[in-house]
Image (tube, helix red, strand yellow):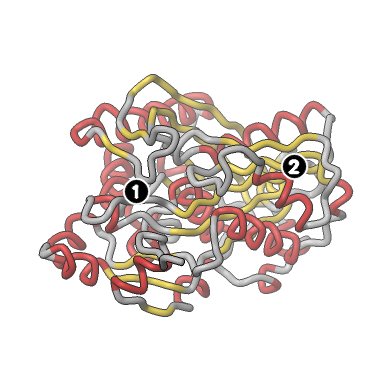
Amino acid sequence: MVGIITYGAYIPQFRIKADEIAKVWGANGTEISNGLGVFEKSVPDMDEDSLTIAVNAARNALARRDVNPADIGAIYVGSESHPYAVKPTSVTVGEAIGATPVMTAADYEFACKAGTAGIQTCMGLVKSGMIKYGVAIGSDVAQGAPSDALEYTAAAGGAAFVIGNDDPIAEINDTCSYSTDTPDFWRREGQAYPRHGGRFSGEPAYFKHVQGAAHLMMDRMGTKPADYDYAIFHQPNAKFPRNVAAMLGFKPEQIKQGLCAPRLGNTYSGAVPVGLSSVLDVAKPGDRIFVTSYGSGSGSDAFDITVTDAILTKIDRKAAPSVETMLNDKIYLDYAQYAKHKGKIVMQK
């Protein structure tokens, strides 16, 4: 019975409205917001990056449940924006939460599904008996070039999950993946901002892979959309997850709780983990959760999850801020302040 032992998310306080970005570039902010379904996005503080977000998410997870850091045998951090090209984020997270020396630690990168890939790895290590607990984190300070369409959605945030088989609060019944070489989005070494393949972003990238993994998961489990209480899909905007949910047969109320993009933006590797955290904030024993991530390049990871009685007895959900609390705790920036926070403009010394 491998599953989620505890969880925690972290979202920076700062926000910028899509209207503010559009105003600078002479675009129609209302039209862009309505088209993407994203009205504002999170922005990191001056001293925040994907590493500090990962540390805060992991600390929030451990605040909810008394897990001995010495029992954590693996730490995997998935991100498109690791602060170092050569130096792991994962070991710094381990040091910060008191889990070093750790048996295995690594940084993952598979575009926006690197966090869910970490969950799969931790599941395998726990099931094999090699470790007691593993920590999987999806964390990003997403990049978007000035005036590019990505600038309206590229956000900051992440979530951490402790995976184990000791009274999990949510059992992961099964997982599967669907991947192909589909170059819809990329960033070469040394480039500050990613590029995207335009028409490839929807079909045959996002929709093909999300549907491929989702159908495979339901075929394996013998389930249909109506069997699930909640569903979370990767959310580069609010339009794509709503459309793919409808294509698969899920209803709007099933994705509502986990759809954070309208108020958060796209946190890349953190998008599905934050959405799942939002669902776990309110889930009840017996609730069934369907999850499908997506990473450009391209691939999707799907999960079938059942919430257990332990969510009421083994963790204190109030010991760390909920996703809803963090979404409502915000400070708005103008474009100049946002550009400074994001390093788009720097002071010459």
Kindly identify which residue carries mark 2.
134
For the point 38% across and 50% down, which residue is it?
143
Q: Quadrant of the N terminus?
A: top right
Label 1: state its secondary structure: loop
- In the image, 116: left or right of 74? left
User: CB atoms at circles 1 and 2 under 8 Å apart?
Assistant: no
Q: Is residue 47 above or below residue 164?
A: below
Check the image and report above or below for 227 versus 324.
above
Up-down: is 283 above or below 87? Answer: below
Query: Observer-nearest residue: 246 or 241?
Result: 241
Q: Amino acid at mark 2?
A: Gly
Residue 86 located left or right of residue 214:
right
Residue at point 77%, 34% (across, down)? 104
Q: Is residue 210 left or right of residue 274?
A: left
Q: Closer to the camera, 90 or 296?
A: 90
- For label 1, the residue is 236
Spot occupied by residue 230 in the image (x, y as percentages of width and height): 47, 52
Q: Amino acid at mark 1?
A: Pro
Splitting the image into 4 quarters, where does residue 33 fall?
bottom left
